[in-house]
Every structure is written in C-alpha cells, then in structure tokens.
Image: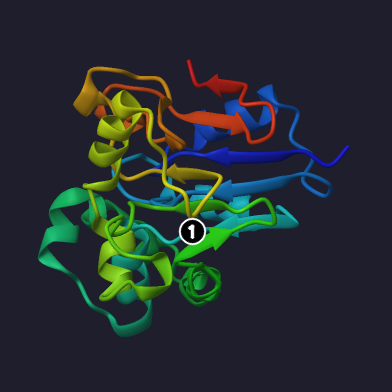
Amino acid sequence: MFRKFVIGDIHGYYSEMMELLEAVRFDYKNNLLISLGDLVDRGPKSLEVIEELRKIQNFIHILGNHDDWCYQYLKYGNEAIEWFYQGGNETMAAYNANPELKDIHLGFFENARLFYIDEQSRLFVHAGFDWKIPFDEQKEIKETLLWDRTLFAAASVYSRLGKRFDEFSEIFIGHTPTQVLGKSIPLHFSNLWMMDTGICHGGKLTIMDIEEKKYWQSK
C-alpha cells in the first residue's frame, strides 16, 4: 500500500529516526517520505541519517537552513560561523573522518527542494513564507522559505479568527520547534501543521501519516 509520511527536523538523531521508520513499518520501495529539512547538526549521527534516507526510493527532501549550511560547506568549503556554533562543528568533524561521503552527500543536497506542493495543493516547506503576498510573487524566496518565523504566528491568529491560508489546502512546516509554545507534539493552527517537535530541544522526533493525520513520536 502506498502511504505518505512527513517527518519533522531530524537534526542528526539517527536512532530516533530509525525508531519511527520501524514504528510505521515504512516501506522503502513503496511509501513516500517528505522531510521538512534540517537533517543534520546537533544530534550525534548526521551522516548516518543521510545514508539511511538515500535508501528510500520515494524521498522528498525540503532544504532546511542547517542543510543549506552543510551544502555550502560541501560545495564551496564555506564554514559559516553561525553554523559552527549550532552543530556544524560536529558535522564538519564527521565529514573529515569520512571524506569519501562528501561528494556523495553533495549530490544528495543538490537534489533538495526549497518547497514541495503536491497534487492536493498541500505545501511542504521548512520555515514558512510571506503570507501577506501571493506565493508565486515571493521575493528573496530562499531566505524566507528557510528562515521565516512569522507564518506560524499568523496561523495561530487565523485559527482564533476561523480563517485559513486559501492558496493551499494544508501547510506543513518545520524549523520552529513547538517548544516555543510549550508543547512537544505537532501543533495544528488553521490549515497549518507545525512538525518540528524539538528533538534537539528536549522534545521528540515526529512522523505523521499525511492522509490520516496519525502521528508517532520517538521515545
């Protein structure tokens, strides 16, 4: 059976990711997995996360800001100071210990998307977008898609007002951990889902069945 899943920010937590894939009995050939980005940094096994995800036949990788830092390092040797102090130092050390993976993972990151819109008009994006203007008129779109923190706040207001983001049937985001709102579970505001449940902030990693909205969390 073809099932569709979305997973929040993994951040190098390989064991927790494997726990979830096993919990949902994920089929590497026949199921779909959409990652909302930030596969690397902060957790102990960033490279192992990527190696495992490379095995999935139907995998959609939405680029996160940590992924972009890693890509810039692999492609150009850039070592952003803000990345270094947010887990990049461990990721660079892992690549220095496994240099044979650099070119392979560069190709992996080059296949990432800034966003994905499926056939049901569901938007998957790492951080958000400028909700005040049409999506196809966004300016500085990469910066916004990777770093925005205004969309979830607008969704919270929309939820209280009974409004929704009409361009999309649903929106799934990562980037902003639900701990900022005192929770460690996926949060649903209006037609937006917050899926980063803060595995690297004392929370958990979460995977969700996109159709059924059933979700599983790491222990």
Q: Residue at x 13, y 52 (%)?
A: 85
From the viewer's perspective, tell me whether residue 15 is left or right of residue 148: right
Question: Residue 174: percent from the left, percent from the top?
Answer: 38, 43
Question: Residue 182: percent from the left, percent from the top?
Answer: 23, 18
* Most distant residue in the right direction: 1
**Label 1 is placed on what type of residue?**
Ile
Secondary structure under the numbered disc 1 in the rendered image: loop
Question: Residue 156: percent from the left, percent from the top?
Answer: 28, 31
From the viewer's perspective, tell me whether residue 23 is left or right of residue 94: right
Disc 1 target residue: 62
34 and 202: which is toward the camera: 34
Image quadrant assignment for residue 163: top left
Q: Residue at x 51, y 72 (%)?
A: 100
219 and 32: which is toward the camera: 32
Quadrant for the N terminus in the image: top right
From the viewer's perspective, tell me whether residue 168 is left or right of residue 173: right
Q: Can residue 31 be spotted in the picture?
A: yes
